[in-house]
Amino acid sequence: MSEAVIFFDPIFEEHRTGFGHPERPERLQASLSALGESGLLDVVEVRSPTDATLRDIGLIHSTRYIEQVQRVSERGGGQLDMDTTLSEASFRAALRAAGALVNSVDGCLDGEFSRSFCMVRPPGHHALPSRGMGFCVFNNVAIAARYAISRRGLDRIMIVDWDAHHGNGTQEVFYKDPSVMYVSLHQYPHYPGTGAVDETGQGKGEGYTMNFPFPAGTGEEHYLEAFEKVIIPAGRRFDPDMVMVSAGYDSHAGDLLCSMRLNDASYRKITELLLGLAGECCNGRLIVTLEGGYNLEAMARSVVQTTGALAGVEVHGKDEAAQATARAEQAGEVISRAASLAGV
C-alpha cells in the first residue's frame, strides 16, 4: 500500500478562466514544478483520476444546475457568475476534479493508499447545490463526503477548510447533517460574507459546524492554537471515519487576495496535526483537495510542504520565521468563543 498519492490530470489545465483571472492553469503548473524540484515526485505516485458520474455529482447538485454547466461548456464557455468562468473543457474538468475525490475515497477504503492530495481545478468549496460561485463549479469535497457516506457506508466525515475564504457551499450542504463535521478557519469579514462564529449548524446538525472567523492579519500562532485547543479535541470526540481537507493557500502571507499571515511551514504543521487525528480515529485516512491560492510561488511551496507531510518525507523549505498575529486579542476571542460553543 502506498503511503500517499497525488491525483492530477492535464484536463484540469484546460479549464480556462480568461486573461488576468487569479484562478488560472498556471497554479497547477507551478505546483507540479515545485514538487518535481523537491524530489517528492520520485517517491509519491501521481495518478490520473476517472470522471465522477452524473449520479455522483447529483449527490450534491441539482440536475438543472449540472445541465447548465454542461450546456454552457459545450457551447464554448461563458459566465456562471461575474467571478466564475467556464470554457469548452470546463465541464469535463469539473467531472474529473470531483472524480479525483471519489477515487480518493475508494482508494483509501480499498487499502490502496491512506492519504491523497487532489491537485484539481476547478475548485469547489463555494459551489452551492443549485449554482456555482467564487471560481467554483462542483463542490468536490462535499460530493466526496456524501459519496463516502451514501455509497461506501461510512458514518462520519470531518471536513477541515483552511482556505482564507469561508466555504459557504460546503457549510450549506451539511448545515443540518450530523454525519459531517465542517470546520472552517477564514478571514472575516471577507468574501463570501458567511462563516460567523455562531453559525454552528441547525436541527440535527446543530454543533457539527465550527467557524473561526479570524481578523485580517491572523498568523500561525492562532491557527495552531485553534487546532490544538479546539479542532483536534472536537475531532476526537466526533471520531470521524475519514478526514477531508479543503486546502486553500490564500491564507499565506504572500497571497494578494487575502490578508492572513501563514507561511509555507504552517501548512505542514497543520497537516501533521490532522494526520495525528486521522491516525487516532480512522486508520490515517486523510484526503486533501486544492481550493484557492493565487501567489504561484507561495502556493507551490506550500503544496510541497503539505504533500511532504502526507508522504512522511522531510522537505527543506524556505527558512522563514512565523509572522505574529496583527490583532492577537481579537483572534484569541474567536478561539475562546468557538471553544465555548463546541464545548471543549
Image (spheres, rainbow, N blue to C red):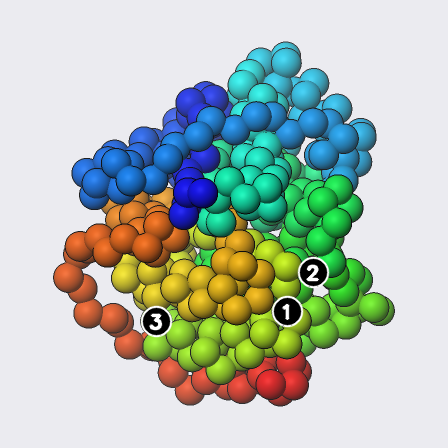
Report helix, strand or loop for mark 1: loop
Q: Which residue is mark 3?
A: 220
Q: Which residue is mark 2?
A: 156
Q: Classify mark 3: residues with Cα within 10 Å, few (<14), some (14-19) or many (20+).
A: many
User: Which of the labelled discs sits on residue 49, or is there none?
Assistant: none
Instruction: Check contact, mark 1 vs mark 2: CB within 8 A.
Output: yes
Amino acid type of the residue tagged 3 in the rendering: Glu
Q: Nearer the viewer, residue 187 or 249?
A: 249
Q: Whole-percent x and y of residue 305?
A: 30, 53
Whether residue 186 appears in this view of the structure is no
Report helix, strand or loop for mark 3: helix
Q: Which residue is mark 1?
A: 239
Up the image or down, 204 lies above or below 53; here it is below
Up the image or down, 122 lies above or below 150; here it is above
Q: Whole-percent x and y of residue 202?
A: 80, 68
The residue under the point 52% across, 29% down is 49
Identity of the residue furthest to the top in this view: 75
The residue under the point 34% across, 40% down is 44
Report helix, strand or loop for mark 2: loop
Amino acid type of the residue tagged 2 in the rendering: Arg
Using the rendered view, name the quadrant where residue 228 is placed: bottom left
Using the rendered view, name the quadrant where residue 309 is placed: bottom left
